[in-house]
Amino acid sequence: MNDHIKSTVFILLSLFLISGCSKEEPPKKEVVRSIKAMQVGGPEALTGRTFPGGARASQEADLSFRVNGTLSQFPVKVGDEVQEGQLLVHLDPRDYEVNLRNTQGQLDRARAALKLAQRNYTRVVKIRDKDPGAISEAMIDLKLGDRDSAKAQVTSLEAQVATAKDALSYTYLKAPFSGTVVETFVENYEDVNAKQPIVRVVDTSRIEFVVNIPENLISYAPKVKKVYVRFDSFPDHEISGVIKEIGKEASRTTRTYPVTLIMDQPDDIKILPGMAGQARGELESGVVVGNEGIMVPISAVFATDTEKQSFVWVIDEKSGQVTLREVKAGEPSDQGIMIDEGLKSGEWIATAGVHSLREGQKVRIIQ
């Protein structure tokens, strides 16, 4: 191979190597991070919105005896309306009556022994007072001990009599409140144990309705003046009620707070425990929509090094990119932090991992 051919081959190989080294690598695909986020809302997000829930009785109890025994009377059945204090079930009381009589007899004998011991002690004390040398101090101490022992025996038996009376009274199972018998767990004449469920009674004169409110709206619940519930079984009836209780702790899975509503039982329909429906609320007069701020979780707000500014990460729902935004935040509370300025109802914000995000980063929302 002559020098000319060698030069040509060398040049071609060099061009091939240079072109291969200068070839651009394909851009790396951006990793989209999944983060927890929420859509914020102001009072207007609560107004006109309905929340699903379920009905339950205002009072309900599975009743049981506090003693063992055999059922002798079961005068009620499922569906019966009962009044407070009414007899529901009765145990055979004979064993407890015998125990009470025996204990009462022991108490009577102990009281008689105490009287005798008291007289003996009083007699020796009088003898000593008249003739100091006629009775020894040891004898006086002995009679005093007999009296104190008899007194302790009376005290103990009095407690046993009280316990026996209680046990006898426990053979009567009475309604703790007025309501309806909805379930019985045993049959008459069965042997039952203490704390074994016997009968279930519910009070349906008032109905409770439990709904779950998102954490971004729970701060407005105390400002709801009235609520209305429409049950699926009676779509043409809307029942008014009030808020009875607002939960103080959010569910770890749904991040919602339980709110219990209460209402009177309507006259023309019968609401039963377990019925499903929808609830809506009306805000108090004077609550100006849009001027009440927006409640967000404490984990969504962070400060700069100087701690004089507060920020949140706002997520663009279409692009998935995050943007740092300064907000005016109030003091933390049980429900979160009120944002007075900087957020609008309907915007999405990150609620976790806020210190590891960067401007423009793409994320995937986990509600």
Image (cartoon, helix red, strand yellow):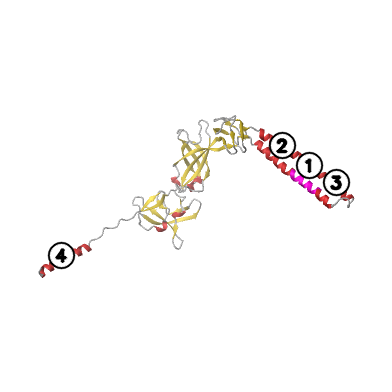
Give the distance between the C-alpha atoms of the residues marked 2 and 1, in whole angstroms. Answer: 17 Å
Q: Secondary structure at mark 4?
A: helix
Give the distance between the C-alpha atoms of the residues marked 3 and 4, in whole angstroms. Answer: 139 Å
Q: Secondary structure at mark 1?
A: helix
What residue span does the magenta drawing correspond to?
143-153
Q: Quick one: label 3 or label 2, which is nearer the N terminus?
A: 2
Mark 4, residues whose alpha carbon is within 10 Å: few (<14), some, or many (≥20)? few
Residue 102 image label: 2
Give the distance between the C-alpha atoms of the residues marked 3 and 2, in whole angstroms. Answer: 32 Å
Question: Which residue bears the numbered disc 1?
Answer: 113
Q: Is residue 136 above or below residue 22?
A: above
Residue 123 image label: 3
- Kindly identify the residue that appears in the image at 15 percent across and 67 percent down: 10
Q: Quadrant of residue 314?
A: bottom left
Q: Is residue 11 above or below residue 142?
A: below
From the viewer's side, name the closer residue of 294 and 317.
317
**Number of numbered discs visible in the structure rendering:** 4
Residue 194, percent from left and from top: 60, 38
Q: Is residue 276 above or below residue 215?
A: above
Q: Main secondary structure of the magenta part?
A: helix
Mark 2, residues whose alpha carbon is within 10 Å: few (<14), some, or many (≥20)? some
Q: Is residue 251 above or below residue 276?
A: below
From the viewer's side, name the closer residue of 100 and 340.
100
Question: Which residue bears the numbered disc 4?
Answer: 12
Q: Quick one: label 1 or label 3, which is nearer the N terminus?
A: 1
Give the distance between the C-alpha atoms of the residues marked 4 and 1, in whole angstroms. Answer: 129 Å
